[in-house]
Image (cartoon, rainbow, N blue to C red):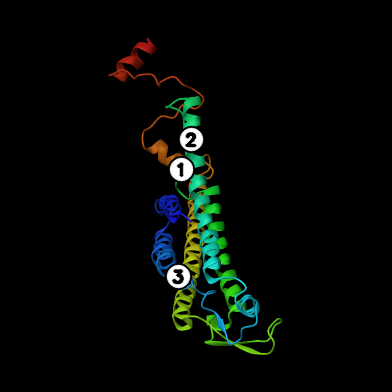
Amino acid sequence: MNWGIFEGLLSGVNKYSTAFGRIWLSLVFIFRVLVYLVTAERVWSDDHKDFDCNTKQPGCSNVCFDEFFPVSHVRLWALQLILVTCPSLLVVMHVAYREAREKKHREVAGEDCGRLYLNPGKKRGGLWWTYVCSLVFKAGVDTAFLYVFHSFYPKYTLPHVVKCHIAPCPNTVDCFISKPSEKNIFTLFMVVTAAVCILLNLVELAYLVSKRCREGLAARRARATGVGHCPDYATSSCKGDDLLSGDLIFLGSDSHPPLLPELPRDHVKKTIL
């Protein structure tokens, strides 16, 4: 599998993520993807070949290996990493959709028209929900895989010797796992990093929800303050303040107020005469 292309696609997620999201992305690539590529595949490359049982019965080693290793660690981790990182690609696709829609709107209405999105990458509206759902999905996938690993391999560890009594084995035989201590170390490392990623997802989710709640409360207070300030112009003291300021208010008229003569007394005399 070409993980280089996969990493290139996810590199665009960094500029649309929060600080917690950037930490999560760094943790995934440095402590999960790189460890998987460099060490895990090599450690588990000989798990079937070096699985030995103290019997020469044909097929016994194969059925015992399938009994104790129903799914390979490497394949489970590969599937887990793919499912965990795919929601981040959906965020990038949503931003690209916004940018394409904004570009099309400008081509149709012109450059001087209003914009559909002030910032297509800003987490508002549907993009906020896409980002929040991606966090929930990533945390759920990691949690589900941790449960699957624990159900297949209790306490996430492998024993040095396993007992097998499945046909066609003639009796209960002892089977020996290749490099169990090394495999246990890498398994626990991957489990711990997955748990840290879940914690980061939950912290980022709490941060986004609390930030949205604070912004909503601030907007409500601002609207309440705006409505409470001079609610009735005819009965409030704001009218008197405007009149005392010397400004003339002409309601329902677009014409400018007439200019007064420089000497109003002369004007009055001429009018009387």
Q: Residue 186: where, in percent of width, then height?
A: 45, 76
Q: Which mark is residue 40?
A: 3
Quick check: 70 left or right of 124?
right
Single out the residue that lies furthest toward the left.
262
Residue position marked by numbered label 2 in the rendering: 102
Q: For mark 2, does the 10 Å Cα neighbourhood hold few (<14), some (14 to 19), or many (20 or more) residues?
A: some
Could you tell me which secondary element the residue under label 1 belongs to?
A: loop
Residue position marked by numbered label 1 in the rendering: 120
Which amino acid type corresponds to the residue marked 3 in the rendered image?
A: Ala
Q: In the rendered image of this protein, does residue 270 appear above or below residue 161?
A: above
Q: Residue 210: where, in percent of width, then height?
A: 49, 62
Q: Nearer the viewer, mark 2 or mark 3?
A: 3
Q: Nearer the viewer, mark 1 or mark 3?
A: 3
User: In this view of the protein, which residue sits in the foreground, 257 or 151?
Assistant: 151
Could you tell me which secondary element the residue under label 2 belongs to?
A: helix
Which amino acid type corresponds to the residue marked 1 in the rendered image?
A: Pro
Say if mark 1 contacts mark 3, CB within 8 Å.
no
User: In this view of the protein, which residue sits in the foreground, 90 or 252?
Assistant: 90
Which amino acid type corresponds to the residue marked 2 in the rendered image?
A: Glu
Q: Which mark is residue 23?
A: none
Mark 2 to mark 1: distance in Å? 8 Å
Can see residue 228? no
Q: For mark 1, does the 10 Å Cα neighbourhood hold few (<14), some (14 to 19), or many (20 or more) residues?
A: some
